[in-house]
Image (cartoon, coloured by chain):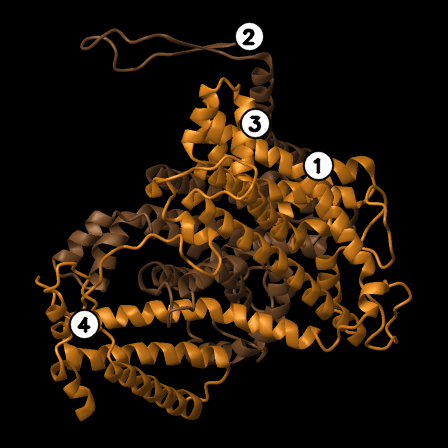
Chain colours: A orange, B brown
Amino acid sequence: MSVLDEAPTSQSPLEPDQTKDTSPQRKPIKVRDFKPSDVLLLAVTAIAAYSIVWIIFDQLTLFSGEFGFVVTWIVVFLAMYWFVNLQIYGRHMAVDRLLGGIVTIGALCMILPLVLLIVYIFSKGLPLLSLNRFTQTQAGVGPLSPISAGGFLHAIVGTLEQVALAALMGIPIAVLTAIFLNEIGGRISSSVRIVVTAMSGTPAILAGVFIYSIWVLTVHDYSGFAASLALAILLLPTVTRGTEEVLRIVHNDLREASAALGAPDWRTVWSVVLPTARSGLVTSILLGVAVSIGETAPLIMTVFGAQVMNTNPFHNPQAALPLVVYQEIKLPQKSAVALGYTASLVLFILVFTIFVLARILGSTWLQNTLRGRGKGKGARLDGDVEEELFSVALAPAMSFGSGEADVDLGYHYRPDQEDPT
Amino acid sequence: MTITETEEHQPAEGGAAGPTPIKITVRRSRTDVVYRRIAWTAAASTFIILVLIGVFLYIRARPAFEYMGYWGFLKTQVWNVSGVHPSFGVGSALLGTIILAIISLIVAVPVSIACALFINEYAPRKILGFFPAKGLLTSMVDLMAAIPSVIYGLWGFFVLQNSMKGLSRWLSDYFGFIPGFKVNTPVYTSSLLIAGTLVGIMIMPIITALCREVFSLTPLGEREGAVALGASRARVIRDVVFPFSKGGMIGAIMLGLGRALGEAIAVSIIISLTFGPPNHLLQPGGNSIPALIADRFGSGGKLGAAGLLAAGLVLFFITLIVNLIAANIVRRQEKKRA
């Protein structure tokens, strides 16, 4: 442990920077609070924890399974990391390091399922994916068919029709609601906000059950249209909330300028607010569409699913991509499971593409609006923009990749120093 | 320009001191009035949809309630909709839903709060000068929220289930004395624990996103004050960030709870539906209202369909209450930001 003991005394972290502070422009002191020896400490603790868990749980108590192993490893590692830091740096530093460890592991635990899921979907779906999946339907595919038989052209057609119809019905209402909330307001606006937020958490299956009771039981016909009604209900709160956030970012000066020129309210919204918010609007719509493409639960009781092509969304059961996955993967036939895997891969790629597209559009728009350099036909702002107007919270949420729109906190922590209390 | 609507704005503080306030009269053109009415109708339609869901589910579910009685439907733990003497209810499904939600919160809440803290307090904006750690992490969390639940179900069924078998066995071997942890036949798949963990993973992104938003609202002045007093990062989080975001965190967790209560597809893929008291967490079997609806839909004739709609009505009321409380808290938090 001699290497580790040296670490805090070898070089005071403040010294090299303090000498620079004599220059007239003072730069913030940057404390290197994670030295190479700390990296070593971290690695050694992790390996030691791994070994202990392996000996005690794998060998002595016959504990098995990756999930449990990782959980115990994490717990043992955190306990050891805290103790080692307590010995070297003292209580405050140990608590700080422990929290840092917990939080970092929390973030890793968050990302791990996503990575595993993507790897799994691609590794299972990609080898089975072939051109005939996109050109054939499930018609005539039986238990004895080969693994590559059948496709989901009928499901792609069904999903596209249902989502398009849902968007056609849901988006105008959602955007108008957002305009009402942000531009008009009134007595009901605060309760509408609460209801919209509550609706965004309404279980997807309830939308299906509702449309089943109000539409399917009335006309006695499963159809793609019924599904699109249910999807529209699910799309409504997502798009409303997104659009409201976007409209809030449009600078108030633009509205005031428009009003000063004598424009009525609707002209201000139509010719100034909406064009300025256009890309942001598209982002929130795309995010709503991305979510509604993958909804499975409401489809069970509205489109019902089909093996053959049905291009008419207003009559008779239709197929849908998520429904193909749901119905095929639990079947015993290999060809059915293969179809489920490939369909889920295509579904994932579809959702992912729309999501990334929305993010890129959104972040470009946000940065342009922040800097007052609108590229579109809409109104633009010059000069200084009040940055605090744009919520700190929204900026990282809208930006994809470069987090430039972020607001810097402007200070650096110094956990090396002891707490005065 | 026709004057069709007038609104009068009067400043509130007029009266005792200062000059008399000017009376402002707003005159709106006819198109403006039409535009405002349309937008108002759109906003009101969210109310209408919510009310319609309750009303229509009740109308269509009446045969089931009339047959079983309201209390009987809530209490009965079997689901025999066909046969000579049908008897059905959401008793076991309701308990199963609650157990699933509790498990999923136990899994999701610590990870979500840790991840939100990491994104907000720890993540460097750029690693090595170009890799956008913070933005990418935020995007990944939001992507997780957009992934279809059927894909989660597929992954949970084939991957998570296998890796959790060992944990289930270990728990039943060493903690079998706790009620619910005892396993009679050594099969550890399709259990409430696995389904609950999967639902927990599914609600993690929504809790994380909301918590991150709440944490970022912590006033900068208080943070800087704490740092100036020599507080470490851990102390800033404990003494400044958490006290400020307590309400918002509860709202975020409750919205996550609402999602967990209503998850149908992933749960119905994992668990094999059984009826009766849900007293086994680690062995196959379990029940939940949304999974029951997804699984039994289309079987059981008219009475069965009415029964499922009645189950839907119960779910609707539970999630509505949870979501309304959560939305209230979240919206109050957002008002603070504005």
Q: Nearer the viewer, residue B24 or A84?
A: B24
Q: Can I make out residue A344 in this image?
A: yes
Cα–Cα span, label 2 and label 3: 22 Å
Q: Can I make out residue B282 in this image?
A: no
Q: Earlier in the sequence, mark 1 or mark 2?
A: 2
Q: Residue at x 54, y 59 (%)?
A: B143
Identify the secondary structure beneath mark 1. Answer: helix
Q: Earlier in the sequence, mark 2 or mark 3?
A: 2
Residue of label 3: B44
Identify the secondary structure beneath mark 2. Answer: loop
- Label 1 or label 2, whichever lies nearer to me, is 2
Q: Earlier in the sequence, mark 1 or mark 3?
A: 3
- The spot of residue A61 in percent (x, y) is 42, 88
Evaluate whether label 1 is on the same chain as label 2: yes
- Label 4 or label 2, whichever lies nearer to me, is 2
CB atoms of marks 1 and 3 within 8 Å: no
On-image quarter of the C terminus of chain A: bottom left
The subunit letter for the residue under badge 2 reads B
Instruction: Point out which mark residue B4 bears.
Output: 2
The subunit letter for the residue under badge 3 reads B
Q: Nearer the viewer, residue A66 or A271?
A: A271
